[in-house]
């Protein structure tokens, strides 16, 4: 879907991917204390619920959105929250954006599967460029196998492996998401990826 398509979806309220709250597994991971501190990025953040859930004095979070409407809505509802100093929302193209410094953590959920499959290698290269060498990528993988066209597009764990592993990423954790929302129960995997020694992306 092009930029105008996403903008139209937010304008008309046709956003079936929007949970209206933080992703339960993110709240669980925050409470577990196992997430990297420092700087975090949530591409395709939508209304920013996960951005807010991740943000703390120990972790500054950037929510990246291509839709002006979504980003403005995110800013409006979250600007007065107690942790508002620890997150920001930016309108930019994930693939073209050049931040001043890389991130310790990147969280992807419903972003990879929204991309045309021809863009998946570029997604992996961009993740590699934006993530610190010792950073962590978290992918909440929505397993789809019966979709005609998209978004969302059909995707499997292997689709992530095929583009991430050649860049030196290894899944150090890949398990069923036991906290998936009811409609997606049994259709989600939580992947935690670390880079293990391959070259840095040339992007």
Image: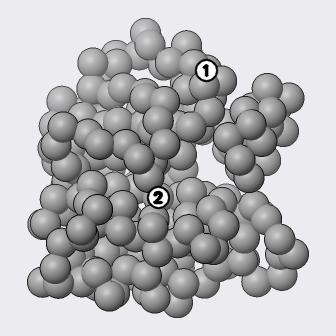
Residue that mark 1 sits on? 73
Taking the image as shown, residue 199 lies to the left or right of residue 170, namely left
Assess disc 2: are there few (<14), some (14-19) or many (≥20) residues with their C-alpha within 10 Å of its C-alpha. some
| Image position, residue 177 (x, y; %) | 53, 72
Q: Residue at x 61, y 73 (%)?
A: 118
Closer-to-camera residue (17/100): 100
> Can you tell which mark lies on residue 108?
2
Q: Give the residue at x 16% y 79%.
A: 199
In the displayed structure, does residue 195 sit left or right of residue 97? left
| Residue that lies at the very extreme toward the top in this rendered image | 80
Q: Is disc 2 placed on a helix, strand or loop?
A: strand
Q: Nearer the viewer, residue 54 or 13?
A: 13
At 18% from the left and 30% from the top, the residue drawn is 57
Question: Measured from the top left, where is residue 149 in percent x and y?
Answer: 83, 71
Give the vertical position of 178 relative to 68 (above or below). below
> Residue 182's quadrant in the figure?
bottom right
Q: Which of the labelled discs sits on residue 152, or is there none? A: none
Question: Eyeballing the image, is 169 above or below 105?
Answer: below
* Rendering quarter of residue 141: bottom right
Residue 146 lies in what quarter of the image? bottom right
Of marks 1 and 2, which one's residue comes earlier in the chain? 1
Q: Secondary structure at mark 1?
A: helix
Looking at the picture, how far across and down is residue 138, in whole percent?
38, 65
Left or right: 109 as drawn, with respect to 2: left
Is residue 145 found left or right of 22 in the rendered image? right
Disc 1 packing (10 Å; few <14; some 14–19; many ≥20): some
Task: Measuring from the top left, give residue 51's x and y in whole percent.
Answer: 42, 38
Q: How is the image coloured?
A: one colour
So how many labels did they put on this image? 2
- Height in image: 45 above or below 167? above
User: What is the quadrant of the C terminus in the image?
Assistant: bottom left
Instruction: Measure how far apart labels 1 and 2 are at the Cα level.
Output: 20 Å
């Amino acid at each position: 879907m092009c930029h105008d398509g996403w903008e139209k979806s937010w304008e008309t309220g046709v956003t079936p991917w929007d949970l209206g709250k933080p992703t339960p597994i993110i709240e669980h991971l925050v409470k577990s204390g196992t997430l990297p501190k420092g700087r975090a990025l949530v591409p395709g953040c939508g209304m920013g619920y996960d951005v807010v859930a991740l943000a703390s004095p120990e972790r500054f979070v950037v929510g990246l959105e291509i839709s002006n409407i979504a980003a403005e809505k995110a800013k409006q509802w979250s600007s007065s929250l107690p942790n508002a100093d620890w997150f920001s929302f930016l309108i930019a193209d994930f693939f073209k954006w050049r931040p001043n410094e890389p991130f310790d953590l990147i969280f992807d959920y419903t972003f990879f599967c929204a991309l045309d499959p021809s863009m998946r290698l570029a997604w992996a290269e961009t993740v590699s460029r934006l993530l610190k060498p010792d950073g962590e990528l978290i992918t909440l993988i929505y397993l789809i196998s019966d979709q005609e066209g998209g978004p969302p597009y059909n995707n499997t764990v292997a689709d992530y492996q095929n583009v991430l592993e050649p860049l030196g990423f290894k899944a150090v954790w890949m398990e069923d998401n036991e906290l998936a929302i009811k409609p997606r129960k049994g259709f989600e995997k939580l992947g935690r990826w670390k880079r293990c020694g391959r070259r840095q992306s040339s992007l």
